[in-house]
Amino acid sequence: MEYALLIFGLLLILLGIVGSILPALPGPPISWVGLLLIYLIPAITINYWVLGITLVLTIVIAVLDYVLPSKGTKHFGGTKYGIWGTNIGLIIGLFFPPLGFIIGPFIGAFVGELIYNSKNPKGAFNAAVGSFLGLLASTFMKILFCLVLLGIYLVVFFSNLDIWF
């Protein structure tokens, strides 16, 4: 049972890293569950501080993942039309892998802004750039956090190496 928790936990953390790039998968929550699984092994002492802090950070990052692309659009002069376009473009982009989830929000924000004001293509482009930058920031944040969770997992694993052999 311990080996199943160990292997499944590592697989979930790796899946979380992949999910940080693909918006269809909630990367940080998946990785956090992977970290939780190693602590569920009876021979490993549960560190409630690590689990609690990483859970709070997971929740904050999950919320920011939805907020950052829209905030980027708004920061670069976008309107509600651009924000809606960003979100719709993100969803539609999921059906066009591998680059659809990157291009989708950009095109969505651009089209949304053009619907709002077709006489200002420069403003629409700026809003689309903001959406793209928000998406990049969100993705970078998720990948970095999932790599930190992987690092914690590995530290726990190697600190308890005597259990496995």
Image (spheres, rainbow, N blue to C red):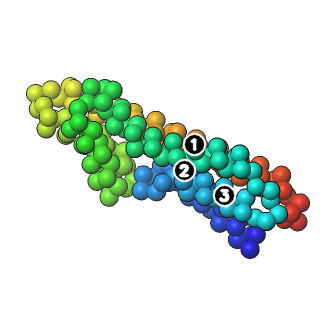
Q: Secondary structure at mark 2?
A: helix
Q: Which residue is located at x 28 percent, y 53 percent?
A: 92
Q: How busy is the neighbourhood of tag 2: few (under 14 within 10 Å), some, or many (20 plus)? A: many
**Residue 33 in picture, x, y percent from top left:** 60, 58
Q: Are marks 1 and 2 in contact (CB under 8 Å)?
A: yes
Q: Which residue is located at x 74 percent, y 74 percent?
A: 1
Quarter of the image that includes the C terminus = bottom right
**Residue 17: numbered disc:** none
First reached walking from the N terminus: tag 3 or tag 2: 2
Q: Secondary structure at mark 3?
A: helix
First reached walking from the N terminus: tag 1 or tag 3: 3
First reached walking from the N terminus: tag 1 or tag 2: 2
Identify the amino acid type marked 2.
Pro
**Disc 1 and disc 2: Cα gap in Å?**
9 Å
Q: Are marks 3 and 2 in contact (CB under 8 Å)?
A: no
Judging depth in this view, the residue of 11 and 52 nearest the camera is 52
Residue under label 2: 28
Residue under label 3: 36
Residue under label 1: 57
Identify the amino acid type marked 1.
Leu
**Residue 46 in picture, x, y percent from top left:** 76, 55
Q: How busy is the neighbourhood of tag 3: few (under 14 within 10 Å), some, or many (20 plus)? A: many
Q: Secondary structure at mark 1?
A: helix
Identify the amino acid type marked 3.
Leu
